[in-house]
Amino acid sequence: MEVINAHTQIPISDTDKLIEVLGLTNDVHEAGYILPDGRLLHLDRSNCFKRKNHLDVLKLLPDFLGQEHSIIDTDMIAFMAREKLVRFCIDGRIHTAVKPTSDQLRKIYTTLAYRANPFEIIISNAAGMTLSQHTVSGPTMGALVKIFKTYDLKEHDDFSEDEFCIEESESHFKLIFRPAMKTVGQFNKKSNMIKMDEGFKEATTLFIDLVKRQN
């Protein structure tokens, strides 16, 4: 196992801080995130005593210390989007929250191209909504480029209904985003006005469809 020494510059970003604490690796079996420049963040995945999962990484950052609620997947996805990280697991999962950089795409390709085991690619937005999912095995670069073109679309409307549910009160319908268990939209029964949280406006059409099914 090779762990690359962290750089000696003063950390200026959360990614830099993680590199200082965790280091980098060339071993895909030890990696947990692909950085924007294609390097791999070391999570000691094969060491049952020292390994960290993807959520553990956030617990190392000052912004998450003392947080009232437990760190959940949507916190991680928002962090991935902000830092432009690709969540990576050699066992068969790649998860993005923004369009990968060319260096990240190249790393994904060189890692997956000659592996027989299938990989699930999950494409989310910064809010945590799943935009699409794909299962690939030994994909070409062209196939990967096509998959990530999802991020080039100006609007998305094919969201997973499993991630949402409706709660009804006397005056409103509420759209609940299940992964975060929070209200992200409200429909006023009297005025027929809809109010959506920032980051979830693209789910308005889905919200309307779910409300119609309640009647």
Image (cartoon, rainbow, N blue to C red):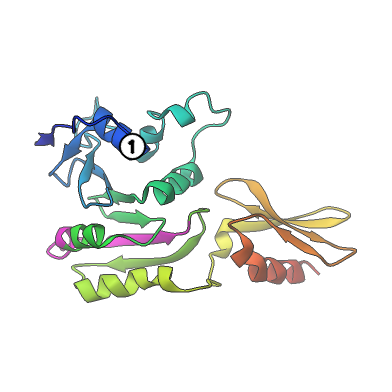
Decide which of 136, 182 is in the foreground and name it. Answer: 182
**Point 54% across, 67% down: residue:** 159
Position of residue 121 in the picture relative to residue 8 (left or right): right
- Write down the residue under mark 1: 53
Image position, residue 53 (x, y; %): 33, 37
* Magenta highlight range: 110-125
Q: How many marks?
A: 1
- At horizontal 32% and vertical 75% (from top left) the residue drawn is 146
Foreground residue, 107 or 69? 107
Horizontal side of 50 relative to 176 (left or right) equals: left
Q: What residue do we see at 19% from left, 29% from top?
A: 8
Residue 201, percent from left and from top: 63, 63
Q: What is the quadrant of residue 199 in the picture? A: bottom right
For mark 1, give the secondary structure.
loop
46 vs 122: above or below: above
Look at the image and say whether residue 182 sits in the magenta stretch.
Answer: no
Tell me if 182 is positioned left or right of 40 in this view. right
Identify whether 125 is placed above or below 54: below
Residue 79 placement: quadrant: top left
Looking at the image, residue 173 lies above or below residue 24: below
Q: Position of residue 160 (x, y in %)?
A: 53, 64
What x and y, as percent, mark residue 211?
75, 67
What amino acid is labelled 1 in the image? Asn
Residue 208 or 80: which is nearer the viewer?
A: 80
Q: Quadrant of the N terminus?
A: top left
Q: Residue at x 23, y 76 (%)?
A: 142
Q: Is residue 93 above or below residue 22?
A: below
Sort mark 1 into few (<14), some (14-19) or many (20+) by Cα contacts within 10 Å.
few
Quarter of image, res 174: bottom right
Give the quarter of the figure containing the C terminus.
bottom right
